[in-house]
Amino acid sequence: MAKLPPKDYIQAVDVPKSVTLGAIGIVRSPYTERHGTPRQSQLQAAPADYEPAIAHIELFPEVIPPEALKDLEGFEYLWLITWLHLNQHWNPTVMPPRGPRVRRGTLATRAPHRPNPIGLSATRLLNVQGLTLTVAGIDLLDQTPVLDIKPYVPYCDAFPQARSGYVGAVEQAGGHEPDVFGLQGHPLAPPRSSGTGDLPAPTGPASA
């Protein structure tokens, strides 16, 4: 059999300078404002009394048919890819909420203010009921548009020994936060006393 000539697929279409995305669903979260919204969906070390918030991901039936969720219940965690629609502007550097007061390059942080405000959240899947996913642990505001959902697969998504730059240095210095809400704690909990006066209020879901 004659060998077929190689195909040059990358020359078939022009490289796009812009893309158009459509939401496939929406987040139903207990958080309605930036203040008090967790900076990450998961904790490194959860306090004994910590209970992650329960949220729902409602997919649009005109976009996603139920069979698209087939086999999803077998996964314990999901990646939620979202559009952080409240963020209209961004800066090339930001001040992370932990560690030394040093401005970092935005693309070296998890800050929500980005050139394209795309959110990436790992959340625990509790249940799939029709086109509604129930999850535990959420760092997103209510009504955040969902762009895509992917299963979390440990063998290719988890690299426990990977270097994490200045974030790793902050962790080694004991700079990890006491809980997912930052130094101020849960917005509905009684105020904490540090013995040195009130702590500054957290800045919302900006993350390092």
Image: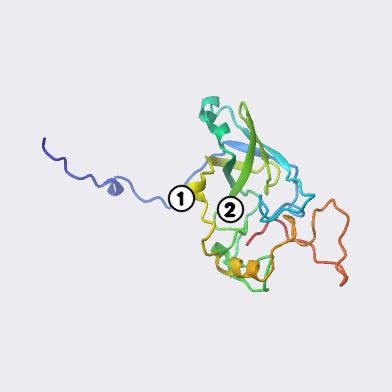
- Pick whichever, 89 or 126, lies toward us: 126
Residue 81: x and y in percent read 56, 45
Question: Which residue does the image show at 68% across and 46% down from the upper left?
Answer: 138
- Quadrant of the rendered image containing residue 72: top right
Residue 129 in the image: above or below residue 207: above
Which is in the foreground here, disc 1 or disc 2? 2
Residue bearing mark 1: 18
Tell me if 91 is positioned left or right of 191 in this view. left
Residue 117: x and y in percent read 58, 53
Residue found at the very far left of the displayed protein: 2
Which of disc 2 and disc 1 is earlier in sequence? 1
Question: Which residue does the image show at 51% across and 50% down from the upper left?
Answer: 157
Residue 159: x and y in percent read 51, 55
Q: Secondary structure at mark 1?
A: loop
- Amino acid under label 1? Ser
Please state, as top left, top right, bottom left or bottom right, where the N terminus lies in the image: top left
- Pick whichever, 123 or 29, lies toward us: 123
Residue bearing mark 2: 117
Q: Are marks 1 and 2 in contact (CB under 8 Å)?
A: no
Tell me if 72 is positioned left or right of 207 in this view. left
Q: Secondary structure at mark 2?
A: loop
Residue 103 in the image: above or below residue 136: below
Tell me if 143 is positioned left or right of 183 in this view. left
Residue 62: x and y in percent read 56, 27
